[in-house]
Image (cartoon, helix red, strand yellow):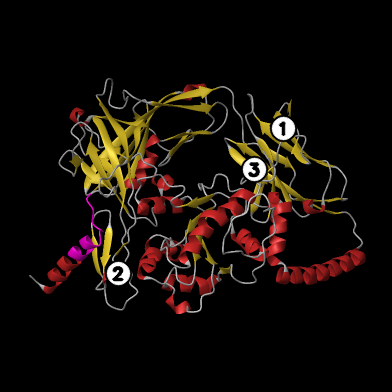
């Protein structure tokens, strides 16, 4: 046995001693998220070469540019994996049937798996031996205490797709299954080829259009291209059966697919809407006055127009639609419709009951959204005839005063000012509802109960909940208090960290200096998640003065050098922010009011502003 094999075997035995390898790991027994049966069916005729695409929407599940993945196909009748053959082959993420038959009809399951990634790291200069399984990664170095588990969990998704194979019933181009599309009489209109979505998955696609089995060429009536059939001056006689046939090659083999469309012609039609006003206007208005602006749209044609007309406001890179609620200061009035000889005239009025200073120089845009095109026009408000000299003096004086005041306040009272703004103006901050998190903070401390480490537990289990939960309403997760009995600690910590917005790490002068605390700090506190993956914000709470900072774990030292630590031992004064006469607790830790303000400053902001916009639409 070679030297590399001996090293691998020794690492495997060492990892087993550390309790890393376990046959009961839930990631080994993979379970896929099942999206059921896809709504769309793939219809084909015997002898064609259809492509059955994977119905899973990959972009909605994860970012394919950053996450490696692979796709496999299963036949639902047998449950066996499809690897290719004379009747079916794999084409990227799709199944290709070069010469489909009735026996190929059935249900096929697309299974998508993201690939597991494994990372290794060591605080020592000697190399690590890395062991990988399908869903886990184990690292074992030459030092006994460095046995840790580093892994990223893979994901699995599945969805079934149906292939329906039929026989031709009449003629060579009238297919038994066909779609339905509508066009309008009196205007130029188009039919869309249902096969255009398959063109990106094959080589050298070429589409030919047919009407009632006759091939269509470019003339004064029809203009066929690869994806659309343009019909000029649609007449009622243009209704009928249209077929688009795509010829292509895949893997050097030539195949063809076809789809039929039943075309119906409606006598009612509407042309592309035309926006009359506003058109890039600049309007002068006095601050404090009321203001109204019409958006006028003309829709030529016959029939009832279904053309939404909406107002929105743009400030920098943010766009927000304006509400139709008349109780708001800025709102949209009910749209007015009137019929003319040319068609319809739509008027959507924007009303401002009281013009504020913040309304100036914003872009108010009217959007017209129609099936035949979208148009937009905008205007901006500016102050009416201002006194430039007085305005310039006021602006310069205000800017200088604000600058001096702001610098002073930010330097001396940064924390107090931030807390005051959060309390008085909560609508300036977005609410944390809907961010997928359940807890405001995860409380972590080494459970090594000797000496000052007991202080950390008393502070974490008693003092912090009383202040942060009891007085300020934060929701904390404390291991041993909030976890369910009997759950594995590693799994509870891993799941809880994904549901917390902050990680509060409590430590004393001795709680992180023992070998057990070193291992705990790397495996369970989430420092690796916060430092490397940058997915959770970490706040260090230093309960005692650290006289030998070199004894702290390397990750804690790096974090402390980068962002500092909140020191509960510094400037200790009795905390008098609430009445403790009715409920007193004996504790050796008695932080100052400044310490508690700094803790609140680093906690998540619970604002009231909705994530959508400040005009509720």
Q: Position of residue 516 (x, y in %)?
A: 36, 66
Disc 3 packing (10 Å; few <14; some 14–19; many ≥20): some
340 vs 509, left or right, is right
28 vs 551, left or right, is left
Q: Is residue 473 above or below residue 137?
A: above
Secondary structure at numbered mark 3: strand
Q: Position of residue 74 (x, y in %)?
A: 23, 39
Q: Position of residue 494 (x, y in %)?
A: 40, 53
Secondary structure at numbered mark 1: strand
124 vs 592, left or right, is left
Disc 1 packing (10 Å; few <14; some 14–19; many ≥20): many
Q: Earlier in the sequence, mark 1 or mark 3?
A: 1
Disc 2 packing (10 Å; few <14; some 14–19; many ≥20): few
Q: Which mark is residue 375?
A: 3
Q: Is residue 82 above or below residue 285?
A: above
Residue carrying label 2: 145
Is mark 2 in CB contact (under 8 Å) with mark 1?
Answer: no
Please tell me whether residue 19 belongs to the stretch shown in magenta: yes
Q: Earlier in the sequence, mark 3 or mark 2?
A: 2
Mark 3 or mark 2: which is in front? 2
Is mark 1 in CB contact (under 8 Å) with mark 3?
Answer: no
Please indicate, yes or no, whether residue 170 appears anywhere in the rendered image: yes
Q: Which mark is residue 16?
A: none
Residue carrying label 1: 346
Secondary structure at numbered mark 2: helix
Label 3 to label 2, Cα distance in Å?
A: 67 Å
Q: Which residues are magenta?
A: 12-23
């Amino acid at each position: 046995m070679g030297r590399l094999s001996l090293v691998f075997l020794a690492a495997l035995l060492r990892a087993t001693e550390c309790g890393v390898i376990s046959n009961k790991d839930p990631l080994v027994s993979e379970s896929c998220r099942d999206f059921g049966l896809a709504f769309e069916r793939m219809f084909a005729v015997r002898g064609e070469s259809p492509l059955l695409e994977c119905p899973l929407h990959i972009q909605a599940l994860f970012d394919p540019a950053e996450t490696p993945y692979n796709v496999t196909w299963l036949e639902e009748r047998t449950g066996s994996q499809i690897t290719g053959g004379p009747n079916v082959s794999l084409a990227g993420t799709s199944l290709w049937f070069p010469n489909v038959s009735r026996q190929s009809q059935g249900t096929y399951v697309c299974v998508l798996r993201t690939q597991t990634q494994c990372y290794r790291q060591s605080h020592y200069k000697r190399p690590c031996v890395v062991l990988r399984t399908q869903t886990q990664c184990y690292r074992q170095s030459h030092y006994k205490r460095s046995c840790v588990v580093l892994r990223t969990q893979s994901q699995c998704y599945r969805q079934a797709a149906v292939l329906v194979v039929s026989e031709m019933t009449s003629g060579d181009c009238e297919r038994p299954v066909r779609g339905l599309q509508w066009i309008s009489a009196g205007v130029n209109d188009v039919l869309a080829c249902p096969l255009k979505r398959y063109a990106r998955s094959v080589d050298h696609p070429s589409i030919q259009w047919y009407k009632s089995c006759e091939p269509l060429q470019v003339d004064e009536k029809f203009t066929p291209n690869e994806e659309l059939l343009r019909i000029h001056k649609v007449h009622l006689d243009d209704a009928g059966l249209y077929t688009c046939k795509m010829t292509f090659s895949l893997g050097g083999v030539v195949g063809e697919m076809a789809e039929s469309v039943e075309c119906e012609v409606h006598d009612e039609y509407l042309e592309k809407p035309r926006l009359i006003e506003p058109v890039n206007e600049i309007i002068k208005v006095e601050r404090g006055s009321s203001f109204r602006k019409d958006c006028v749209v003309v829709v030529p044609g016959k029939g009832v127009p279904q053309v939404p007309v909406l107002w929105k406001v743009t400030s920098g890179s943010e766009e927000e639609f304006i509400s139709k609620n008349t109780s708001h200061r800025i709102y949209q009035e009910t749209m007015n419709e009137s019929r003319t000889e040319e068609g319809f005239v739509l008027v959507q009025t924007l009303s401002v009951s009281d013009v504020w200073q913040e309304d100036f120089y914003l872009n108010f845009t009217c959007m017209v959204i129609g099936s035949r095109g979208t148009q937009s026009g905008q205007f901006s408000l500016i102050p009416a005839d201002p006194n430039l000299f007085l305005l310039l003096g006021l602006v310069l004086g205000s800017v200088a005063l604000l600058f001096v005041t702001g610098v002073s306040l930010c330097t001396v009272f940064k924390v107090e000012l931030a807390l005051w703004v959060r309390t008085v103006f909560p609508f300036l901050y977005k609410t944390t509802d809907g961010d997928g998190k359940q807890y405001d903070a995860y409380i972590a401390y080494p459970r090594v109960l000797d000496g000052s480490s007991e202080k950390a537990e008393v502070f974490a289990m008693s003092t912090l909940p009383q202040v942060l939960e009891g007085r300020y309403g934060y929701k904390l997760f404390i291991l041993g208090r909030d976890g369910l009995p009997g759950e594995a600690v590693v799994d509870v910590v891993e799941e809880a960290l994904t549901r917390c917005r902050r990680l509060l790490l409590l430590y004393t002068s001795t709680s992180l200096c023992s070998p057990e605390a070193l291992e705990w700090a790397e495996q369970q506190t989430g420092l690796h998640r916060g430092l490397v993956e940058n997915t959770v914000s970490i706040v260090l709470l230093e309960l005692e003065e650290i006289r030998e900072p070199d004894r702290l774990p390397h990750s804690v030292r790096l974090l402390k050098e980068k962002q500092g630590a909140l020191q509960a031992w510094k400037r200790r004064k009795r905390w008098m922010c609430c009445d403790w006469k009715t409920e007193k607790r004996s504790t050796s830790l008695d932080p100052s009011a400044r310490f508690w303000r700094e803790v609140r400053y680093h906690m998540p902001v619970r604002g009231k502003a909705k994530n959508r916009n400040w005009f509720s639409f």
